Amino acid sequence: MRQIIFDTETTGMNFNGRDKSEGHRIIEIGCVELIDRRPTENYFHQYINPEQTIDPDAVRVHGITNERVAGEPTFAAILKDLLAYLNGADELIAHNMPFDQSFLNREFKLAKAGFKLEDRFPLTDTLQLAKNKVPIAKYNLDALCKYYGIDNSNRSLHGALLDSQLLAEVYLRLTTEQSGFDFAATTVQSAATPAETIITTISASSDSWQRISISSEEAAAHQAYLEKIRQ
């Protein structure tokens, strides 16, 4: 079983429209891979140039500025690598899936991909899973981390990769009370920091290599996390 847990950050959202993605774009995507419910070294993380201005209210949420993503590739430019990474997934998992789904479908349409996310992958919404199981007032990621005792102290701002790692821990607790991976131990570098490195990974279900841009701090923190769970 290959599951991909993912999250996106965006330029903002259309609060007044049925389609929250209308008029907005994705600026960051982070994906974590689980094979038979265990994390692997194969993950995907990319900042994206949205070719439009990021709303100030959105910057206050995720800290990603127009200057930070100005030199990043467009979504169309990273689409091939993203699809190669997702290829073969038995399930895609996100918190409030309709939100991320609508943004990805908008990007697919703008890139003339010719399909929607739900056309290719089974989708699971952890928000709905939580509402059916957890007796709490709010169902956001912070509230679920608190309920399950998951350390999210590194989450001063939203970030697609860190949020995906936290959500993976929440998902495992929601479905079988499985835990012990301590995704929250990974420290994700501030979006405003320019230092980056290139990590090459290979998908467990394909022969295509993926090249992703991450910071040296992110790479070191991820490696420390992997060594921890192997003990």
Image (cartoon, rainbow, N blue to C red):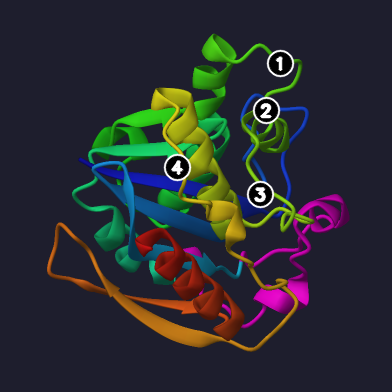
Residue, x 68% and y 86% (percent of image)? 194
First along the sequence among labels 1 and 3: 3
Q: CA distance from mark 1 to mark 4?
A: 31 Å
Q: Verify whether residue 56 appears in magenta.
A: yes
Q: Alpha-carbon neighbours of circle 4 within 10 Å: few (<14), some, or many (≥20)?
A: some
Quarter holding residue 42: bottom left
First along the sequence among labels 3 and 2: 3
Residue type, numbered disc 3? His
Q: CA distance from mark 1 to mark 3?
A: 31 Å
**Foreground of the two, 151 or 165:** 151
The residue segment tinted magenta is: 50-75
Residue 39 image point, x, y percent:
35, 53
Q: CA distance from mark 4 to mark 3?
A: 12 Å
Left or right of 16, for residue 125 = left
First along the sequence among labels 4 and 3: 3
Residue type, numbered disc 2? Tyr
Q: Is residue 57 visible?
A: yes
Helix, strand, or loop for circle 3?
loop
Q: Alpha-carbon neighbours of circle 3 within 10 Å: few (<14), some, or many (≥20)?
A: many
Mark identifier at residue 105: 4
Residue at label 3?
24
Residue 106 image point, x, y percent:
50, 45
Residue at label 2?
147
Residue at label 1?
136
